[in-house]
Amino acid sequence: MKTLKGPSLHLAQFSDVAPPFNSLPAIAAWAADRGFKALQIPAWDERLFDVSLAAHSQDYCEEVSGTLAEHGLVISELTTHLFGQLVAVHPAYDRLCDGFAPPALQGNAAAKTEWALERLRLSAKASRRLGLTDMGTFSGSFAWPYLFPFPQRPAGLIDSAFDELAKRWLPILNACDEEGVNLCYEIHPGEDLHDGVTFEMFLQRVDNHPRCRILFDPSHFVLQQLDYLDYLDIYRDFIRMFHVKDAEFNPTGRQGLYGGYQGWADRAGRFRSVGDGQVDFKGIFSKLALHDYAGWATLEWECCLKDQDDGARQGVAFINEHIIRVTDKVFDDFAGAAVDQAQLDAMLGLARPSLQGRA
């Protein structure tokens, strides 16, 4: 068993135009003051990080690492979710994704995808220069509008979507392999990889690629009513990243799973600050310790009620309280005694009188 690392903080929900959230030195000082040990950096946020420069300059990478080290921090991982989202975009969502790309590319779906694929390659190179082994992302989606099968889905629609998804991602997985970096897909509603079955469909199509891995976030499974503890047992060998994010599902006589037309505060399923929702984190941290997960526990703050600074401060304490420092002892050793093989045989009734000398 291994003791996982933490707490780390995913910066995507904290980055802002106002200080101290608009530069890496300032946000590092803020995070260290609240007790974080690492930062998970969104590679798309140019206020904090220049992924192109990092891919080509070791000096810049050492400068970034040094900036964090001044505050007792390290980089846990880079994330590339907005790049990944642009790899596969259904036309219904194309305009909604325009803000993920440079203004000159907006409205040009093919150009946005090509730009995103190159950014993913740069992110893998940057990860290697920074000494990182795992990188988070989204899969994007062609088929999400067809999740509910009415009107009836035509035969072959989902297979075609996953075939194209794998075709686009396979070169990126190969590029990650060249850099020694695992690509960890966050299994997430809105993505074609949104549960275990869809991950397996994709994994098969990329020929069980050794860099195809999982970013585990239990909050999305609460909203899907999926057994996330069983999921940890099934996919233990694939999970390389972990977002500590809480959620709750409170169906009523008026709404349930498809209450998505309401604002976040009014949905049956909604995200909450850690400890305020329904996720069984004691069970999760126990499973991760048992399964030798050696990565980071990274707070991802998303809450429809609580102030983000309170969520960050409380999240640090929550993660520290839940990390299991694994034991190197067996608790009942005090009652044990040395036993040789002859005694073991006797305990099992296997001892036999010697037949030597008998006629």
Image (cartoon, rainbow, N blue to C red):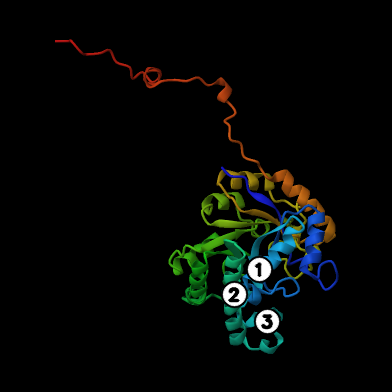
Mark 1 residue crowding within 10 angstroms, few (<14) / some (14–19) / many (20+): many
Front residue of this view, candidates 152 and 355:
355
Compute the Cα span from label 1 to label 2.
Answer: 13 Å
Q: Is residue 176 above or below residue 99?
A: above
Q: For mark 3, what is the residue?
A: 101
Say left or right for 242 vs 23.
left
Q: Position of residue 259 (x, y in %)?
A: 73, 66
User: What is the count of numbered marks?
Assistant: 3
Which amino acid lies under the numbered mark 3 shown in the image of this protein?
Ala
Amino acid at circle 2: Leu
Q: Which residue is mark 2?
A: 122
Disc 1 marks a residue whose amino acid type is: Cys
Nearer the observer, disc 1 or disc 2?
A: 1
* Quarter of the figure that contains the C terminus: top left
- Disc 1 is placed on an element classified as helix
Q: Residue 61 bears which disc, if any? A: 1
Left or right: 168 as drawn, with respect to 319: left
Label 3, residues with CA under 10 Å away: few <14, some 14-19, many ≥20: many
Q: Is residue 258 visible?
A: no
- Which quarter shows the N terminus? top right
Q: In x, y percent, where is residue 183?
A: 56, 65
- Which image quadrant for residue 48? bottom right
